[in-house]
Image (tube, grey):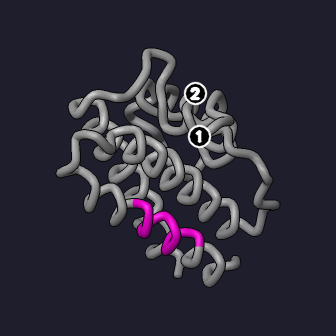
Amino acid sequence: MSVLMAKEWLKAAHQDLLTIDALMERSELTAIVAFHAQQCIEKSFKAILELREEKVVKLHSLVRLSELVSNDVAIDDYTTLLQLNELYIESRYPAEMGLLPSGKPSVSESQVFQVCATDIYGLIHDVIERES
């Protein structure tokens, strides 16, 4: 097991969580919160792949990554995961970065994204800690 590299991925995911926490007070930055939530979850999933010494694929699809780690982590809020997945996959230009198909996320949506990212990070953190 590559515990050391898994912890590095998790450390990077934690930095995204810290960024989210710092931005939550700023209602004009909900799109950035959404983007960092997606990044946190992606990096957390990649930590599990690293732990399992599987190839850390160069893809950003949270749906596909969640399938790859489904033996280790059960996702409760798949609806939010799908929203965040769409946000990253569809956003290619700065004007779209962190936007949902319906536009800029609301404050309440960004709070849901924060909870989802925190929960998935916590689940994966626990798996890695148990195995290290």
Q: Residue at x 58, y 77 (%)?
A: 8
Most common secondary structure along the magenta stretch: helix
| Residue 9 sits above or below residue 86 on the image | below
Q: Position of residue 46 (x, y in %)?
A: 64, 59
Identity of the amino acid at label 1? Pro
Query: Dot 1 lies on which element?
Result: loop
Rounded to the nearest angstrom, the CA distance separating label 1 from label 2 is 15 Å
User: Which mark identifies residue 86?
Assistant: 2
At label 2, counting other C-alpha atoms closer than 10 Å, the crowd grade (few under 14, some 14-19, many 20 or more) is some
Query: Which quadrant of the rendered structure holds the N terminus?
Result: bottom right
Circles 1, 2 touching at the beta carbon (< 8 Å): no
Q: Is residue 37 shown left or right of residue 24? A: right
Q: Which span is picked out in magenta?
A: 9-16
Can residue 111 be found in the magenta stretch?
no
At label 1, counting other C-alpha atoms closer than 10 Å, the crowd grade (few under 14, some 14-19, many 20 or more) is few
User: Which mark identifies residue 52?
Assistant: none
Q: Position of residue 79 (x, y in %)?
A: 43, 24
| Residue 126 sits above or below residue 90 on the image | below
Identity of the amino acid at label 2? Glu
Residue nearer the viewer, 72 or 114: 114
Residue nearer the viewer, 104 or 113: 104
Give the quadrant of residue 91: top right
In this rendering, the label closer to the viewer, 1 or 2 = 1
Query: Dot 2 lies on which element?
Result: helix
Q: Position of residue 127 (x, y in %)?
A: 47, 65
Q: Position of residue 16 (x, y in %)?
A: 43, 61
